[in-house]
Amino acid sequence: MKVEQISIFIENKSGRLADVTHALGSAGINIRALSLADTSDFGILRLIVDKTDEAKTALKDQGFTVNKTEVVAVEVPDRPMGLYGILQVLDRGKVNVEYMYAFVERCGENAVIIFRFDNPEEAIKVLTANGINVLQGERVYSM
């Protein structure tokens, strides 16, 4: 029930994001979700793509530093207080959210949020025990 995410460390200068997207596009890789966090000197671009291993290779071939981590894709009711309800379940289960970002697609009537947890196995257990749908990686990659 986990999803593979790649993180790319990039210099905070003009053209570097374009270089990443060019390398991925040239390799036939589709970006499904992304998040960018930056400082004055560098950024961390986090991506969910349809072909993780191929993306990692394509980016490394272009000189990028790439890391693969596991995240969790969760269906969140697309209405006021929808995200709050999920976060409340996680808080009651003592699960810490390290970061999160939205997914490009909806899943039926729900939004999809990507979560990075300090303990993903416990997070999945807490979420599913509370009737919250955690998406399989294969479904996320093909949405």
Image: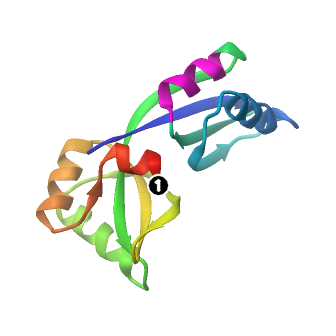
Please determine whether, in this image, residue 6 is positioned above or below residue 91: above
Question: In the rendered view of the protein, which quadrant contains the N terminus?
Answer: top left
The residue at the point 47 percent across, 55 percent down is 143
Amino acid identity at mark 1: Met
- Residue that badge 1 annotates: 143
User: In the image, which residues are magenta?
Assistant: 51-60
Magenta-drawn stretch contains 48? no
Residue found at the very far right of the displayed protein:
14
The part of the image, by quadrant, that contains residue 141 is top left
Please determine whether, in this image, residue 92 is positioned above or below residue 30: below
The residue at the point 23 percent across, 66 percent down is 132
Q: Is residue 79 left or right of residue 89?
A: right
Name the secondary structure under disc 1.
loop
Q: Is residue 96 left or right of residue 65?
A: left
Q: Is residue 31 left or right of residue 12?
A: left
Colour scheme employed for the rendering of this structure: rainbow
- For the image shown, how many numbered marks are present on the structure? 1
Residue found at the very far bottom of the displayed protein:
80
Residue 49, position as x, y percentages in the image: 53, 40
Front one among 40 and 46 = 46
The residue at the point 51 percent across, 39 percent down is 50
- Label 1: how many Cα within 10 Å (few below 14, some 14–19, many 20+): few
Front one among 14 and 112 = 112
Dominant SS in magenta: helix
Magenta-drawn stretch contains 56? yes
Residue 33, position as x, y percentages in the image: 55, 51
Front one among 13 and 62 = 62
Please determine whether, in this image, residue 59 is positioned above or below residue 128: above
Please determine whether, in this image, residue 110 is positioned above or below residue 103: below
The residue at the point 56 percent across, 41 percent down is 47
